[in-house]
Amino acid sequence: MIRHRPSRFPAFVLLVVLTAAGCAGRPVVEVALVGLAPLESTLLEQRMRLDFRLQNFSERPIRATGLDIALNVNGRPLARGVTAQSFQLERLGETRVSAVVSTSLFQVARQLLELTARDAFSYELEGRVYLEGWRRFMRFSHGGEISRDELERLAGIGGREPAPLRLEGTAPIGP
């Protein structure tokens, strides 16, 4: 008796078609980092609030259940954070979301050592927006520069009161 081995080709084709259909319906969203503000901290842990503006350029509303964020400065990890804040982006709409990130004394000390040798710091913000009713999450990334004066104002260096920093820039969200 000859046994016929089922072909895997139809399953593969179905997987490709479903993946392509999922990509075609993906929402077009941009994330803008619009501010940083220092929060109450301890000697070993520093905390900041990051403020984002999310814009939905699609015809479909998007419901999100939270964000996770990593902030890298000069190519090195500086802070991480999460928020379970749920929000909805109306079709062709926007909303603001905040998240708290934490860093350690050692990560900050490493960056401060480089502060004296630089006039500006490069930063990269990476993260995921967790979606309801879509794929599990969508990634985003945004980079830019912060001047030494802006960082000193944010940290309250030179006898100044720590002050929020306003930034503008966009980061497209993608798979």
Image (tube, grey):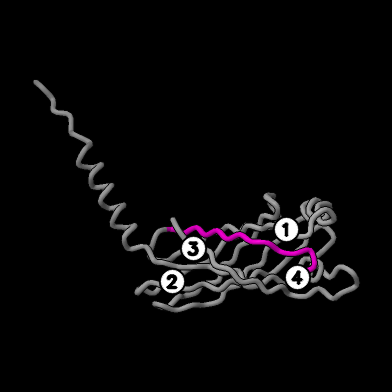
Quadrant location of residue 91? Answer: bottom left
Question: Label 3 crowding class (10 Å Cα cut-off): few <14, some 14-19, many 20+?
Answer: some
Relative to 117, is 2 above or below? above
Q: Amino acid at mark 4?
A: Pro
| Main SS class of the magenta portion in the image | strand
- Which residue bears the numbered disc 3? 172
Cα separation, mark 3 vs mark 1, equals: 22 Å
Cα separation, mark 4 vs mark 2, equals: 28 Å
Of badges 4 and 3, nearer the viewer stands: 3
Q: Left or right of 53: which side holds 24? A: left
* Of 164 and 146, the residue lying toward us: 146
- Which residue bears the numbered disc 4? 38
Cα separation, mark 2 vs mark 1, equals: 34 Å
- Mark positioned earlier in the residue sequence (4 or 2): 4
Q: Quadrant of the N terminus?
A: top left
Cα separation, mark 2 vs mark 3, equals: 17 Å
